[in-house]
Image: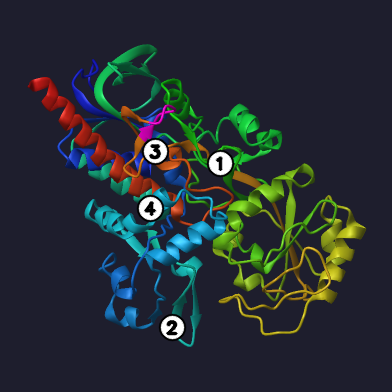
Amino acid sequence: MSNHPETNVDIVVVGSGNAALCAAISARENNATVLVLERAPEHKRGGNSYFTDGAIRCAYNDLADILKLMPDVTEEEAERIVMPEYSPSDYYDDLMRVNSDKSDPELAGQLVNRSYETIKWMREQGVKFELNYENQSFEKEGKYHFWGGLPVKTENKGIGLMTNLFKRVEELGIEIWYEARAKELKKEDGRIASIVVEKDGQSLEIQTTSVVLACGSFEANKQMRSDHIGNEWQAAIVRGTEYNTGDGLSMALAVGAEKFGNWAGCHSIGTDANAPKVGDFTKPGDIFKKHSYPLSIMLNKDGKRFVDEGADFRNYTYAKYGREILKQPDHVAYQIYDTQVRPMLRKEYDLEEATFYQADRLEDLVEKLPVDKETFLKTIEEYNEAVQDGEYNPTVKDGKGTRGITPPKTNWALPIEEGPFYAFPVTCGITFSFGGLHVSPDGEVLSVDGGTLDGLFAAGEMVGGLFYENYPGGSGLMSGAVFGKLAGAAAADYSRKKNSEVTK
């Protein structure tokens, strides 16, 4: 590491997750000099991206498009794959549908239309991809049928993604400062001219032509969660890095950036009630989530159901059901399964970290839970009686639902009647907050007075206006990469123009 900050660095990138490193790589490819600032120590680098499951949602035409990303897939393996098309319009429609048409159309279009080319670019940078067999396909008559528009994931989850991005950053000679907390942006002649950094107990000012902010939202800041999303969010578990406390947002707003998007909303999920309070870097890979709930019924401590567990595939409901769990007494709910569906549950239910209760009879199971036992059993009985006949098929929305109870269960409704029975306690884990900055389609930060904040760019969780009430799974990583790449290139272009003005 340099003893003194360079005074002539073209671009400072704040953060070291997926979006930040994509920005740094993109800027370096465009011949800019780049310095990356990471608040965390080196062993906790990588931001929230390190904790992801690696699923990344892109538009594609057919299986051939997917296989271009994965040259190791054999012809024999490919012949056993049934891959439905997932066009840009499919992706766009999903994004709009789950966000009640509130997503900014221009930003949404950029995310969707740039998704496949960005995935190809990531592969050129050394990121490896594989088929998401485990969570997005079902085997039927010897073939793997993919569904839900999410067949691609990074090899070895978020750990693999970040390992390969850091490797590429090193190859390109991009310097990273760890335990370097960005504190303040400074303007000169109406543009960003420097950034103040706290490093080794000192306050340093780095002169720069442009800054790319990609250091996450405010999900790890209890006070900001309480102020913007609601008091109950103080109780939420932080699923990722503890360092995403809104520093980038605060710095940008202080120099006149415009807030954008749903500051009262966030991405949250049902996660193991005994998961760590903040992301544990020794146990990454999203191992605490509990995402087979469409096959369950979920009851709170009062013994009541509170959502339609089978409203849609989990891709389209998990990001909003977390907050529904948070609203329940003591912020806890119980996913209930019987032995009919237990073998169908996702692998996270079999990990040693999974908390669960088991009994041969429902009456014995409920005795192990701190719940209103009588109501709990009555709710299950009423649910069982409401289940309608039909063909049960978890590969499609099978319409096998309930009648006469509220909330209904629209799909995948089986009576809970065959022991052993299982209860998995879940609480709410926050991933990132939806509120961010207003950016242009190229990642330029827009100001409250309607123009651009010259020299300031943003990417990743800091981009507001994409996600509102919900989130199509895998869109966060894709958005980080798309807007990271765009912001890095735009910052390099801006720096090149500024530098040429100086030399004239």
Q: CA distance from mark 1 to mark 4?
A: 18 Å
**Helix, strand or loop under label 2:** strand
Q: Position of residue 313 (x, y in %)?
A: 58, 66
Taking 204 as reference, is 313 left or right? right
Residue at mark 3: 439
The first of marks 4 and 3 along the sequence is 4
Residue at mark 4: 111
Q: CA distance from mark 3 to mark 2?
A: 43 Å
In the image, residue 46 above or below residue 311: above
Quarter of the view holding residue 61: bottom left
Q: Nearer the viewer, mark 3 or mark 2?
A: 3
Q: Residue at x 38, y 40 (%)?
A: 459
The amino acid sitting under disc 4 is Leu
| Residue 169 seen anywhere in this rendered image of the structure | no
**Helix, strand or loop under label 3:** loop
Label for residue 143? 2
Quadrant position of the N terminus in the picture: top left
Q: CA distance from mark 3 to mark 1?
A: 14 Å
Q: Residue at x 34, y 58 (%)?
A: 113
Residue at mark 1: 262
